[in-house]
Amino acid sequence: QCLPTTHTVRLCKGCDRSPVLHAGRTHRIRPHYLLVKAKDGDAQEDEQPPEISSSRNRLQATIKRKMTQLQSLEKEMGMETLEDRLQTSIQLPLNPPYRLTTLIAEAASQGKCVLIFEVGRPTPSTTSSQLAALAKQYIALGVDALAVMTDVEDTSAGMGDLFAVCQAVKAPVVAKDWIVSLLQIVDMKQAGASGVLGIVNQITGKGTAMMSSFAAASGLDAPIEVVNNMELDALAAAGVNVYAINTSVGLSLPIAGFSADIANGLLARMPQGALTLVGVRTLDEARKARLSGADALLVKRQLIQTYTEPPGSTKAASSSGDSLFAMSGLRRLVEDLQYLTSGDE
């Protein structure tokens, strides 16, 4: 699904949205703000439980903020510079020494599950170098890959945290954000990421497959997040073969039996040879996801914090005693996850 370098990136000067490539033409990413869409593409406005409505509203606000930020940046950069950066990205594809899809495929062939830890600043005062040191600890304890948070709500350093972590570890590092613009993919590539996590079909809609193609043409892995069978079937037909579930939106909604539906639905329906990455917030979610066929687990910071923060603590470890507790907790978490995903009874 890589795009040949003969394709040209063109921007529509009458439109303020980010472009995606498609057979020499320009398509625009149109965000689908509502979490539930009808088969004809129109959002359903049926009355929904408060928790779903609240989650949907948060998603709307987040994507609106992200679109505003990126549109402002693209305008400041200028059309010519933007076109040049996008075109250069696919003309000079990356060949990272540590690639997430290669690691997942190799582990799957051996019946193993890949553990990916989210990496984000524990406190606003955490520096990029301190975050890189934490990332090194994760890898030393047996974590297979890392997902570095790059959204402005997670870091004030822009791509600085991502760059620092990529330089510090010899393991696959992907950038985790809300991906609504090709420019983000270019920036993440230049910071050293071997992949991007945050292309969500519910947000990018018809532009999803093309964003995936652009990432692939740039040499980056780009799992696509799906939340229902209709999305999965459409993306499979478009040639997408790496999928994310519950990494950003959709499946964390507090609906009774929802996790079981996912396990028996999306994971069981994956195309032959597809690779799957599932986000987990508890050990039970990790166990169920693995039993349902997940090839890799994205271990969310919520789960990491339950193991690393002392009881009653509201801040990251600051004293030497707290640091020892956190290190011990990390070791226990990795061991527990490795055991739960090993296949042993």
Image (cartoon, rainbow, N blue to C red):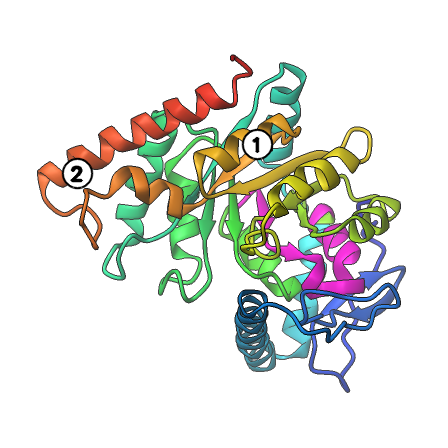
Q: Is residue 305 left or right of residue 296?
A: left
Q: Is residue 62 left or right of residue 86?
A: left
Query: Which of the labelled discs sits on residue 323, or is there none?
Result: 2
* Residue assigned mark 1: 288
Q: Residue 249 location, x and y as percent?
A: 59, 57
Q: Is residue 256 left or right of residue 327?
A: right
Residue drawn at point x = 70 percent, y = 69 percent = 83
From which residue to which does the magenta span run? 193-216
Q: Residues within 10 Å of mark 1 (few under 14, many from 20)?
A: some
Residue drawn at point x = 71 percent, y = 58 percent = 201
| Residue 20 falls inside the magenta stretch | no
SS class, disc 1: helix
- Which quarter of the rendered picture does the N terminus lie within? top right
The amino acid type found where label 1 is placed reads: Lys
* 46 is higher (above) or lower (below) than 86: below
Q: Residues within 10 Å of mark 2 (few under 14, many from 20)?
A: some
